[in-house]
């Protein structure tokens, strides 16, 4: 079945940080090579360019640069692979891709809106979560 | 025998040095080999131009600092993930598929230009 081709491989088991780093680059390359397919499936040609999608994938990976434990990196890679599989198998829809990956890169609109500029940081943190 | 060697020594033809880097044969014959598909290799200037364009259009790169010798991580201040991203952008531009081992070695514009120029399938 073409759907399970990507996930059939042995789950990653990195011994060292270097090996995990190599796997991250492999995952990134695999994701970049599926970008033309993704653009074709979801008709994203008018919305983003391939190089923007590459930058978006890179910034998603970069969100986790602080991780040092190779097993945690493996787990994150597994989740990334799962997400990539879902996207390529057309298990998601166009609005998912646009909402999760294309838009919202500049931060939420409510943070940069002029209406909330004067409010205190306390309120902003309160709106975000219970624990701060 | 000695006479023969002496005569041969005198009628030896002068040696001509070949023109530099085979540039003359290409310009002379390029208009003759119209139906050959062997000389649609990219010229070095074209490879350099396109590689520099790709690097300059990378969002984190300052276009004024890009030269053909620039090192991605040392001179342009990028990190290893940006390096991989630039190599992927070059793969897309030249319609190549660079194997991982070779892609890890491409660290600077020089190496990228060398690799692409020597790749037979570069488009």
Image (tube, coloured by chain):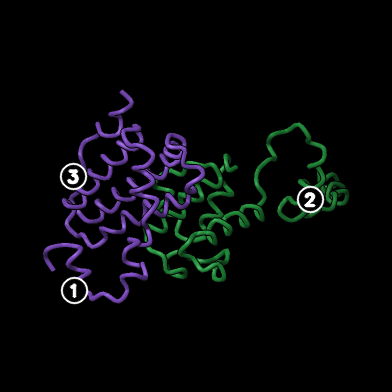
Chain colours: A purple, B green
- The relative height of residue B75 versus residue A81 in the rendered view (above or below) is below
The residue that disc 2 covers is B24
Q: Nearer the viewer, mark 1 or mark 2?
A: 1
Q: Nearer the viewer, residue B92 or A85?
A: A85
Q: Are marks 1 and 3 in contact (CB under 8 Å)?
A: no
Chain that bears disc 3:
A
Mark 3 nearby-residue class (10 Å; few <14, some 14–19, many ≥20): some
Discs 1 and 3 lie in a common subunit: yes
Q: Secondary structure at mark 3?
A: loop
Residue furthest to the front in view is A115
Residue drawn at the location 27% of the way across and 45% of the way down: A80
Q: Nearer the viewer, mark 3 or mark 2?
A: 3
In this view, the residue in front, A94 or B86, is A94
Separation of marks 3 and 2 at Cα, in angstroms: 56 Å
Contact flag, marks 3 and 2 (Cβ < 8 Å) = no
Task: Name the residue located 48 percent from the left edge and 47 percent from the top edge.
Answer: A47
Q: Are marks 1 and 2 on the same chain?
A: no
Count numbered badges in the picture.
Answer: 3
Residue A17: x and y, percent? 22, 56
Nearer to me, A17 or B114:
A17
Q: Position of residue B29 (x, y in %)?
A: 80, 42
- The residue wearing badge 1 is A122
**Mark 2 crowdedness (10 Å alpha carbons): few <14, some 14-19, many ≥20:** few
Task: Give residue B1's position: percent from left, percent from top.
Answer: 81, 43
Asked if residue B91 can be seen in this view, the reply is yes
Badge 2 element: helix
Q: Position of residue A101 (x, y in %)?
A: 36, 49
In this rendering, position of residue B115 left or right of residue A16: right
What's the residue at 42%, 49% (across, down)?
A53
């Amino acid at each position: 079945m073409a759907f399970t081709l990507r996930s059939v491989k042995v789950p990653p088991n990195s011994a060292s940080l270097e090996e995990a780093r190599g796997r991250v680059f492999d995952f990134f390359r695999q994701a970049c090579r599926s970008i033309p397919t993704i653009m074709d499936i979801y008709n994203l040609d008018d919305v983003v360019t391939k190089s923007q999608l590459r930058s978006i994938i890179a910034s998603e990976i970069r969100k986790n640069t602080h991780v040092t434990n190779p097993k945690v990196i493996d787990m994150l890679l597994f989740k990334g692979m799962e997400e990539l599989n879902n996207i390529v198998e057309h298990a998601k829809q166009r609005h998912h891709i646009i909402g999760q990956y294309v838009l919202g890169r500049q931060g939420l609109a409510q943070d940069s809106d002029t209406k909330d500029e004067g409010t205190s940081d306390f309120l902003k943190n309160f709106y975000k979560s219970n624990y701060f | 025998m000695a006479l023969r060697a002496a005569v041969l020594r005198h009628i030896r033809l002068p040696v001509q040095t070949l023109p530099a880097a085979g540039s003359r044969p290409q310009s002379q014959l390029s208009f003759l080999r119209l139906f050959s598909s062997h000389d649609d290799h990219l010229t070095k200037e074209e490879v350099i131009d396109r590689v520099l364009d790709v690097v300059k259009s990378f969002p984190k790169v300052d276009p004024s600092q890009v030269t053909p010798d620039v090192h991605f991580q040392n001179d342009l201040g990028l990190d290893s993930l940006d390096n991989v991203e630039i190599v992927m952008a070059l793969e897309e531009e030249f319609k190549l598929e660079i194997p991982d081992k070779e892609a890890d070695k491409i660290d600077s514009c020089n190496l990228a230009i060398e690799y692409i120029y020597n790749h037979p399938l570069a488009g």
